[in-house]
Amino acid sequence: MPSVPPEALPHRVVVTADGPILVEGPVEVELPDGRKAVSERPVTALCVCGNSRRYPFCDTSHRRRVRSAREEER
Amino acid sequence: MTTTPTAPALSAPALPLARGPLSAAVLAALRGGPLPDELDVEGADPFGDDLQLALYVCYELHYRGFAGVDDDLEWDPALLGLRRRLEAAFLAALRAEVPGGGDVAAEIEPLLVEHVDAPGVSRHLRRRGELWQFREYIALRSLYHLKEADPQAWVIPRLEGEAKAALVSVEHDEYGAGRGERMHAQLFADMMRELGLSDRYGAYVDVAPAPVIAEVNFMSMSGLHRALRGALVGQFAVVELTSSPGSDRLVRAAERLGCGPATIGFYAEHVEADAVHEQVVRHGILAPLVAGDPAMAEAVVFGMQAANLLDARLSDHVLAAWHAGRSALVGPLPEHAADA
């Protein structure tokens, strides 16, 4: 049986419940202002919360932020 | 003990300096001497300089060895026997210090919350760290980062199925996704040179305090023992889950301190890469690994808690020294202008 070449497989896109959208790369992301952002990673995490300092890529800024002493962290 | 000499690898480091009777005994054995029969392992501080350095030297035989040391000593029964006792003491101390449990999700949850006012080395460096402190931190972290991803690679043949495939995909990224110049260990070396530090493997072992060595030893121990494969995955998970925001703070620290592109680039790479790795670790590695396997879940929880404990001990050591206006190193930072 002939094997399926990897490039024939569809790119997988994973929508996570609490974070970014994961896209199999490499990808070129076109933004509304015409800017193009390139990621050569095998998988790229796209920001969907809009808070990333590295938009359109996720920097985990979607995480909940709290003030607490170290004791409560453990 | 075998005496057949083998040619040392070009990058093999020099032996470090002893810090007590245990490390002195291991170093003497590596120089070809006999290992003493009577060594008080159980009486030594399991987190102390002497035991941790002795263990570190034993483990380095499995990575790059040492210049002038017979490569075959990696599998010397006497050294392996002593290593086993050192590991037993370290492991028992870790198990005594962490609460344990079997709820992996409960261990993950607090790691995904940003505690904006919590103490920590990256938070200190971002807000008010000085360049000498940043350079010290990089020198200390070089014990791991110059072999970044290597301890975790040992777990690959001990996993199977989806967890194995997912872990390899993260490791592939750590190793530059097929490009040698993009390997994270190489990016770290580039940063060290930019900061005027030596990127020679092992250059800062002699100035690394015990908490730094212990953190690396925990990875090596968990990587080398199949019985600790769950702990290795737990340790890996903690790093990947906490690295992205920590790296972002170090990007800002490096920008504020006027560091160059290799330094900013190393941490910027980890912000984006580890945002992906977090997702892969949680959903691709941990979930399938512990599904229906309570014993594996307990092993992963132990690895996560031990990693958190060792990270906290390292952070406490470094911040206590800096807050007192002291160096966090064992001795002064060696200047390596000659080999920079």
Image: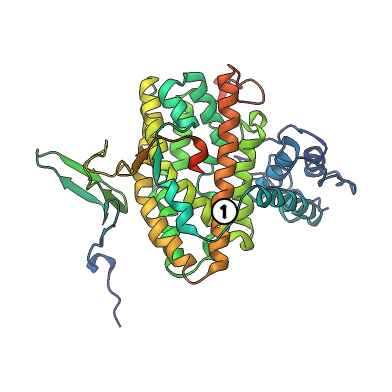
Chain letter belonging to callout 1: B
The residue pinned by badge 1 equals B303
Residue at the far bottom in the pictured view: A1
Q: Would you place residue A32 above or below residue B165 in this image?
A: above
Relative placement, left or right, of B130 versus B325 is left
Q: At 74% across and 31% down in the image, what residue appears? A: B17
For residue A40, say whether it is visible. yes
- Residue B178 point in image, percent of width and height: 39, 51
Q: Would you place residue B182 above or below residue B316 in this image?
A: below
- Residue B133 point in image, percent of width and height: 51, 22
Q: At 76% across and 33% down in the image, what residue appears? A: B19
- SS category of the residue bearing label 1: helix
Category of crowding for the residue at label 1, using alpha-carbon neighbours closer than 10 angstroms: few (below 14), some (14–19), many (at least 20):
many
| Residue nearer the viewer, A29 or B339 | A29
Amino acid under disc 1: Gly
Residue B324 image-quadrant placement: top right
